[in-house]
């Protein structure tokens, strides 16, 4: 039993040395008999120790309480790092994606990874297909400067989503403080849709021409606000469209009058059919195509400048 | 000798705890005196323990027998993860690349990383040069949804290749089962060509205009089928071209009549010169340029829909 | 105290086993009582042991003396690997970026990540904004085959920069030997500019139309040559422009007569205003836009073929 005993000891050593209830802490450098123990290595070990399938697991199994970068692994054993929100509404939220508009005037041009990077093309009604495939791109620390999609997007089985609208190019440590809108769902709607947006969008394809406005909309889920409220949500969109939706929801897979499709309407439930003006991830006619669809071109756009210049960060729990 | 003894013990402990003849296994969670040992961490350690230059090394040095994701390292010490086929024909196959066509109508447009992403351009006869440079892209789990090229493509010294045609967007755990064509070589032809496609294509440049049909073709190697056979291979291509090749081979670097170049002809040896219709990775005239060259446009294309909508996964051993 | 003692022992074991004053060394395989210790794993552990925020820290804290790939971590705990130059002028240089021109005739086309990938567009005066955001791309081993930007670009606090011009597609182990120009600064100018180019370019925006030639140039810093000299630097540029700059400097953020902007002029201080011909990372008029701006199109371009076909590697210390 000696091996087992020593293993237990080792675990205890590390436990006390570098690791306190799952928090990512900075151990002091130890210098003893000239032996140097690297503090960055200590922080790495404390992060690695909580390696899990999701931030929720890290929270529940290891009691992590600090927001930050953690290590995750897919079912197949692919390791990656992403941001965990361990504080909002109980914490345990995994950042799995961000939708970042790199060119408001580019309609389905380079960088529109969530819609189409090669124009509006009837022969490619699914655009890049990013909502329903396992391609990944970007990084957690770059999530406000570029599109981001990690393995958790398709690998994690979650119950709810959280969404943050964070100003472009904000650095990770400032996301929570600078977000112009933050909310989450509590209905466990993902459980009825395969446990992820990857599976939800297989059920509700983001495909140009595949449905009609209103009749074929996907789920619309009520949200709980963490930053902002229904009024501030409404005011993030242009004055001319504020009567075309109801705030306080997140809505998935909607069509407009010309059968252009959008993947999600953040913070709202459309009541009208000009969804290209307030929903994102759109594939459709030229001018109605792009990661941010046609948000920018409506009159009074200035009032939505805040939202058009913020990345949409998507979390699972 | 105490240190050495303890090190030996540790190795043994881990050996029995997490690691059985190199297989990636799931250790049960151990709870003892309130000390929690993380099973995901255990799986990580068992994967890391076999860190090698290639899947073949993992197979031979550690007796790994399970297909899946393993850790590899380049000579310079860059670590990466990829899929190892540990079962086909003795196993030890490293996935180093996939050629995925994201737009059959896009001829050398965005996403044609193995040919040219910027049109057919006589001033760029090598296109992106991906076959002979050390740029990498994509991920193993995304290899059927996007182009993939890892460090093994240029770092590993192999003897043979294996090729899988897997339907687009199939998930890793379903690759082997859903592949429409799988074969491998056994002639050790890579040993005569520098040990990798990276070196082979330096010897046989994939350059538009650099040679003539037939006269300047690169090596054509007989293959052993793992899924499918010569007849099924023939039937994957269009009826109008089935008399222009001989099945049962993989052929590298061929030219067509207009001096367009293609990097490889999968499963066949061309006997005709319309190679743009059945070879891939092509740089040439407009319409003969693209990751899948001109496979799609021939009459009876439907009969090759299977192959045009499958990613071409390339392994070394 | 037993745990602590054992931990000390372990550290010593590893120290002697795999690790000698921070150098990346190859331990011999150890076979004892049939227990195999993996040499690649040993090399990995010796690399991981020096995990730090910068190559300079690895040099100073662990006495690393060998050029090569090391592990770094950002303040947030994101781990990455890059190349450390541990020998030039005392060593401790971290490779944080490379500017690679993939298409000399493509003016702000795909792959121009340091300028604009979507044409010259007055509505996008900052182009991709890569100099001042946290998006990353590429890999260390691919730095001469594709653009490269790692987390160190924005995370590391440095004092000086080093620049290597390395022929396209050269492999990492050959960089130092094949470089056509290498130099570094010694003025600690980064300390007055936020400690990185990320912060320097926030102070001196790389924005088309934001300034005038000469009047609004950013800092011009004298350099010390490691490969080449003032004469060889001059000769790397075209004969028609050699009277328009003074060699022996690196200059940041300059404008030309048409208010086109370039991020840096490597090895020189412009005295004229045709900066698009000898400065890189440019956003401006069509033809004056691209990672290598307009270097190639000037008369006598052949004499600068060397520099137009070499990647510009950027280090911090």
Image (tube, coloured by chain):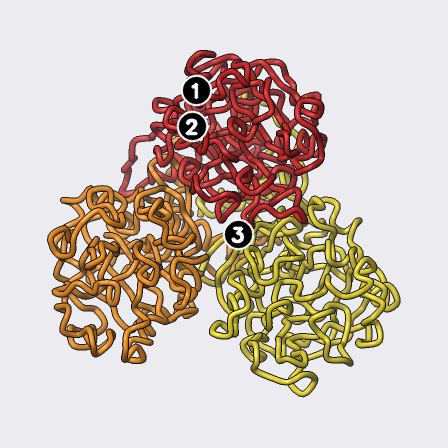
Chain colours: A orange, B red, C yellow
Q: Are marks 1 and 3 in contact (CB under 8 Å)?
A: no
Chain for disc number 1: B
Q: Quadrant of residue B67?
A: top left
Residue drawn 43% across and 69% down? Answer: A169
Assess disc 1: are there few (<14), some (14-19) or many (≥20) residues with their C-alpha within 10 Å of its C-alpha. some
Classify mark 1: helix, strand or loop: helix
> Mark 1 or 3, which is nearer the eye?
1
Label at residue C80: 3
Label at residue A290: none
Residue C196: in sight, yes or no? no
> Mark 3 or 2, which is nearer the eye?
2
Q: Earlier in the sequence, mark 1 or mark 2?
A: 1
Label at residue B299: 2
Q: Are marks 1 and 2 in contact (CB under 8 Å)?
A: yes
User: Which one is nearer the viewer's eye here, B11 or A153?
Assistant: A153
Assess disc 3: are there few (<14), some (14-19) or many (≥20) residues with their C-alpha within 10 Å of its C-alpha. some
| Left or right of C151 in this view: B28 | left
**Could you tell me residue C21's position as x and y percent?**
68, 49
Residue at which label 1 appears: B239
């Amino acid at each position: 039993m000696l091996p087992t005993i020593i293993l237990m000891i080792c675990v205890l050593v590390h436990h006390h040395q570098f690791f306190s209830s799952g928090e990512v802490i900075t151990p002091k450098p130890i210098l003893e008999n000239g032996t140097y123990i690297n503090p960055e290595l200590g922080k790495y070990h404390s992060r690695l120790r909580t390696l899990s399938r999701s931030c929720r697991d890290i929270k529940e199994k290891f009691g992590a309480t600090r927001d930050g970068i953690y290590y995750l692994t897919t079912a197949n054993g692919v390791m990656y790092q992403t941001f965990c929100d361990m504080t909002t509404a109980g914490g345990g939220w995994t950042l799995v994606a961000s939708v970042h508009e790199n060119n408001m005037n580019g309609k389905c041009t380079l960088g529109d990874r969530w819609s189409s990077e090669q124009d509006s093309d009837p022969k490619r009604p699914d655009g890049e297909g990013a909502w329903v495939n396992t391609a990944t791109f970007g990084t957690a620390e770059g999530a406000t400067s570029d599109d981001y999609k990690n393995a958790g997007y398709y690998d994690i089985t979650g119950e709810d989503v959280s969404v943050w609208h964070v100003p472009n190019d904000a650095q990770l440590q400032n996301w929570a403080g600078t977000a112009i809108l933050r909310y989450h769902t509590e209905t466990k709607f993902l459980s009825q849709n395969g446990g992820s947006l990857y599976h939800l969008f297989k059920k509700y394809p983001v495909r140009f021409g595949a449905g009609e406005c209103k009749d074929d909309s996907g789920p619309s889920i009520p949200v709980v606000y963490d930053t902002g409220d229904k009024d501030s949500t409404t005011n993030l969109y242009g004055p001319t469209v504020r009567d075309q939706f109801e705030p306080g929801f997140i809505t998935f897979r909607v069509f407009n009058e010309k059968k252009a499709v959008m993947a999600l309407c953040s913070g709202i439930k459309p009541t009208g059919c000009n969804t290209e003006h307030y929903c994102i991830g759109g594939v459709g006619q030229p001018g109605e195509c792009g990661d941010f669809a046609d948000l920018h071109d409506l009159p009074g756009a200035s009032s939505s400048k805040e939202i058009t210049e913020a990345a949409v960060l998507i979390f699972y729990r």
